[in-house]
Amino acid sequence: MNTTIVAQLQRQFQDYIISLYQQGFLDNQFSELRKLQDEGTPDFVSEVVSLFFDDCAKLINNMSKSLERPENVDFKQVDSGVHQLKGSSSSVGARMVKNVCISFKECCDVQNREGCLRCLQQVDYEYKMLKTKLQDLFKLEQQILQAGGTIPQVDIN
Amino acid sequence: MEVCNCIEPQWPADELLMKYQYISDFFIAVAYFSIPLELIYFVKKSAVFPYRWVLVQFGAFIVLCGATHLINLWTFTTHSRTVALVMTTAKVLTAVVSCATALMLVHIIPDLLSVKTREMFLKNKAAELDREMGLIRTQEETGRHVRMLTHEIRSTLDRHTILKTTLVELGRTLALEECALWMPTRTGLELQLSYTLRHQHPVEYTVPIQLPVINQVFGTSRAVKISPNSPVARLRPVSGKYMLGEVVAVRVPLLHLSNFQINDWPELTTKRYALMVLMLPSDSARQWHVHELELVEVVADQVAVALSHAAILEESMRARDLLMEQNVALDLARREAETAIRARNDFLAVMNHEMRTPMHAIIALSSLLQETELTPEQRLMVETILKSSNLLATLMNDVLDLSRLEDGSLQLELGTFNLHTLFREVLNLIKPIAVVKKLPITLNLAPDLPEFVVGDEKRLTQIILNIVGNAVKFSKQGSIYVTALVTKSGTRAPDFFVVPTGSHFYLRVKVKDSGAGINPQDIPKLFTKFAQTQSLATRSSGGSGLGLAISKRFVNLMEGNIWIESDGLGKGCMAIFDVKLGISEQSNESKQSGIPKVPANPQHANFTGLKVLVMDENGVSRMVTKGLLVHLGCEVTTVSSSEECLQVVSHEHKVVFMDICLPGVENYQISLRIHEKFTKQRHQRPLLVALTGNTDKSTKDKCMSFGLDGVLLKPVSLDNMRDVLSDLLEHRVLYEAM
């Protein structure tokens, strides 16, 4: 009975993670990240990911402060924030966030405050969305582990 | 006696007179009564009559007068008092009305008169307008004629057609008897009759250009009336009977292409003009009208423009023909050149193979012969044969190399060799000749000159041999110094910037001789093929003049520079060249040129314990890179800034991964500083690899120029990192992982 539950959970996990890739939330880098997780570092991915989300929150907060007042916007600061965000998101494979960062950078280059605010909102939305999704994913992982199974490797082409 | 209230007429009744008076009065009355009727009738007929009141008054006046006269009829005979009363009343009324009318007329008549004057005025105006209408119509006619003429003239680009058409059309429009065009001759001293409308003329009918009448016409742009007897106007055989019609002449400017400058319109100063002469029909009383003269002037201008267009067209046709000829010639030349090149290539191909084969046979057999037992004379002979054949082989190789160098198809053959040994061997080769010429050669190698280097040994030998050989060749006495050192700073050429990199260095070789020296003006020519300085001393030296040119090419291939300094004739000269060589790490192996390196271990699959340093400002990406390397078994230290990196880096770290994301130059400084830190122990320096998100060539070039050993594209996959690490540790350089 346990094995069927495990198998079910595993299938659920597989479907979920594949759907995340297909919907474009994650890209190849995330699967690379998962490869680095082994017995020595069992929580590598979740640690990296939570670090990423903390980073996001902090950066978004700083950038929204910079963009607050229309008359003196420190675009340099916003630019560096976007740069950091882009780097982080591409390191963990957060595809949507990375794409928004690209348009964000463009708005920043032309010093378009409205555009920047829009992008900031979008980034906020995307990372929170991704956070929820990944939390679900990790919950599934925990369930599998508790049921005594192993987390399946998912091959993404 | 009857007393009646009668009035006796004043005069006795004379019967006949009375009768006449009676009848006259009657008629007057009738007339007076009919006048108002007529007036009313006609006024009713007319549309406008502003003086109705006057009419009424006048009518009243007339009627009363008539009444008076009518009543008068009764007064011729005895009449009663009533009649007299009526008569009196009528007379009184008449008097009143007449006086009133008389007074009124004083006002009215001036008005009526003024009406008359206004009418006169309007009539005059109408006549004037009619005249002006006539003028405008004539002008319009003229305009139409001009347009038509212009259209005819401008519809062709052929000179003769233009002129002919002008004359014909003018003749038609103005109904001329004769129309002629006089063109200036080539000399410009005469006018020649070129075209006429009707009459044929003897050829070469010319008129000198300096006639006063011609000057007069040329002096103004307007049409000028000239006398029919002037030489330009005598176009027909003179028959005395006719009264010659009026003649007009106008100048036609002949514009040249060179007259048109871009900025200003042509000035009317030095001009050539043609003369157009127009004759009205004789025996008609016609005169030249102003509008006709204007027409003629306009046409003359148009003709000038049309002629210049025709001239431009001729010019451009000629130019086009010329270009076509040149094109054909160039094409031919190109094909000839191609044939020549093909011939040369064929020749070289033949030479390459056919000539080398016997050469090799000679050299090989001579060497073998050297190994056998020989008498001293035989040995000397064999050695000479060998030397000569080697020289010949070198010459052939030189020529081939040069042509390949020019094609750009020559590539350096890199290998590791012993630099010190190379110098000694070159000097050994030259020593025999130097000893014979009594020229001592001194070799001075700098202490920090690396022993084992990576480069093209054969070509370097060739260069040094060539330079030192030249020094020996062109020196009659004195001595030769050869110095070799490592150079860091810029060389003489200001645009050549030497960047010290970790695994490369620049070798500088200076060869000083005390020979004939070189005229500073000749120095640039030295490096051109086949050019030799003409001094007597060199005439006997032989050689094809290729040596320096080839050496320069090789030096350039090795990313270096070569030049010669001389203080002048008789003061010797110094040849200096820099070349870039790689430093080899194998210090315990002897000359290994040509032997490929065999890796000590197979591909490193396991990097256990490999100490690496990761520098990244971004926490997440730092963590990811660390995770990657830890997974591969490395021992990873992480730092988040350049300062930290410099503090932490040590000889224990084998590789340093640096994140270079921002486009500024500051990030690359860390690489330079690490180089600086390890200047003394170059071989202990860790390998520097940049991690960047940029894939373009400029980033790669920048990394190379700042001394990085490799560049990686982020994000790095696990397999990629594994390959990269093993490549890096094996070859110590990595520039293809993009």
Image: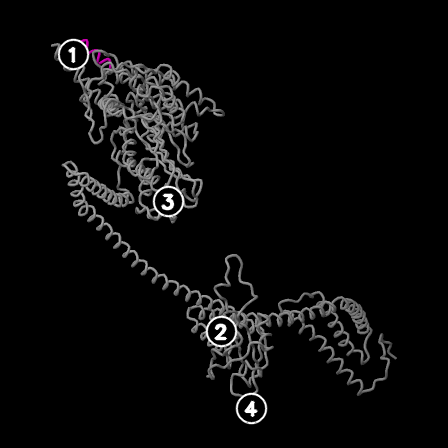
Q: Are marks 1 and 2 in contact (CB under 8 Å)?
A: no
Q: Residues within 10 Å of mark 4 (few under 14, many from 20)?
A: few
Q: Nearer the viewer, mark 3 or mark 2?
A: 3
The front one of B495 and B681 is B681
Note whether residue B140 is visible: no
Q: Label 1, on which residue?
A: A149
Chain of the residue under the numbered disc 4 shown in the image:
B
| Type of amino acid at the residue the image marks with label 2 | Arg
Q: Secondary structure at mark 2?
A: loop
Are discs 1 and 2 located on one and the same chain?
no
Q: Label 3, on which residue?
A: B526
Q: Main secondary structure of the magenta part?
A: helix
Chain of the residue under the numbered disc 3 shown in the image:
B
Q: Are marks 3 and 1 in contact (CB under 8 Å)?
A: no
Residue B186 is marked as 2
The segment highlighted magenta reads: A138-150
